[in-house]
Image: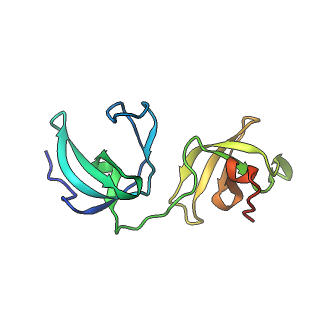
Amino acid sequence: MTQPQFEYGESVRLIRNVRNDGTYPGKEVGELLIRRGAVGCVYDVGTYLQDQLIYRVHFIDDARTVGCREEELILASDPWVPNLFEFRDKVVALRSFAIGGEVVVERGQVGTIEKVLRDLPDGVQYHVHFSDGRILQIPEPSLAMVDAAAAGVDHE
């Protein structure tokens, strides 16, 4: 087994969403525990099945301690590009989109995030699945959460 990459007391950032795999008490299996981007402090390092390092990380802002695999963490000081939306989030288009001059998504149309594209030179973009079955790649500033749009929040 390799040596731990992170030590007790180090600040780390979560780079993947962590959902309950059935080991977190009081939460449903599959329920989101901590969103990617959250920063926490390594509390302990242990093993799972004798070959996987598991870091017990305390996320102060969420008042929660969860087990994280090494590949789910980076140092908190490492470069990070935040994103507003996650897989399965319901979003609304803030403008219309056309392909070959034909409008295929109207402003206000609701879609579901299928994939987050964070490492693009033009900023964060998403694969969004719209109700007509189309999946389009949409830049983050062109989307809003369905709840924010319903509340009349203007993002333009």
Image spot of residue 45 (x, y percent): 18, 49
Q: Residue at x 18, y 53 (%)?
A: 4
Work out whether 11 lies above or below 44. below
Work out whether 142 lies above or below 106. below
Which of 128 and 153 lies nearest the eye of the viewer?
153
Which of 22 and 79 lies nearest the eye of the viewer?
22
For the N terminus, the quadrant is top left
Q: In this view, which residue lies farthest toward the right?
A: 102
Based on the displayed image, in which of its 4 quarters is residue 132 positioned?
Answer: top right
Q: Residue at x 41, y 34 (%)?
A: 27
35 relative to 123 in the view: left or right = left
Image spot of residue 89 (x, y percent): 60, 44
Could you tell me how many numbered marks the image carries?
0
Which of 109 and 147 lies nearest the eye of the viewer?
147
Q: Residue at x 75, y 49 (%)?
A: 150
Q: Residue at x 72, y 63 (%)?
A: 155
Q: How is the image coloured?
A: rainbow
For the C terminus, the quadrant is bottom right
Image spot of residue 111 (x, y percent): 70, 42
115 relative to 156 in the view: left or right = left
Work out whether 134 lies above or below 143. above
91 relative to 120 in the view: left or right = right
Image spot of residue 33 (x, y percent): 42, 43
